[in-house]
Image: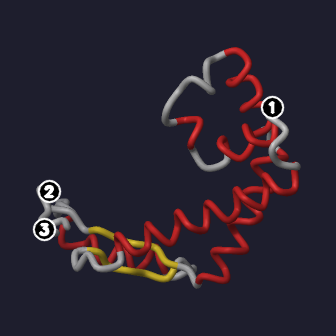
Amino acid sequence: MPAYASIYDAVLIGLDRPTAELDERLTRRVDVMWQRGLVSEVRELADHHGLREGVTARRAVGYKQVLAMLDGGLSDDDARAQTVQATKRFVRRQRSWFRPDPRIHWLSADSSTAERAAELAAPLTPERP
């Protein structure tokens, strides 16, 4: 596990939302990705740019599910649903990794966040004449 030691003089700020709100936002995000052409992008990369031969990108959340759909293994709805589920798992892993870090100041991602972040960063801000 990390030693939680910083190399740089920095304020680490984590933004958090309730799980139910995150889940709703993730579902909407996947819908927007589909609307903005994720399927076409993956098809282009798979057909003309070696996506299937690559190791990392073809396993990325979204790409993996769309490739399975393009190969006939999933329906469009199933690919979307699996992308949402994979993204939720990824978020849970991120939360478990970052939550115990004592250097991180966790803030609710609401309208007062920018003001609180500025307060936390104030000691690092150089004084100006």
Q: Which residue is mark 3?
A: 3
Q: Amino acid at mark 2?
A: Tyr
Image coords of residue 76 (percent x, y)? 87, 49
Q: Nearer the viewer, mark 2 or mark 3?
A: 3
Q: Amino acid at mark 3?
A: Ala
Q: Amino acid at mark 1?
A: Ser
Rounded to the nearest angstrom, the CA distance separating label 2 from label 3 is: 14 Å
Q: Indicate the quadrant containing the N terminus: top left, top right, bottom left or bottom right.
A: bottom left
Q: Which residue is mark 2?
A: 8
Task: State left or right for residue 6 relative to residue 115.
Answer: left
> Disc 2, disc 1: CB below 8 Å?
no
Rounded to the nearest angstrom, the CA distance separating label 2 from label 1 is: 41 Å
Image coords of residue 118 (percent x, y)? 35, 73
Residue in front for this viewpoint, 73 or 9 = 73
Between disc 2 and disc 3, whose residue precedes? Answer: 3
Q: Please tell me the numbered disc located at residue 40.
A: 1
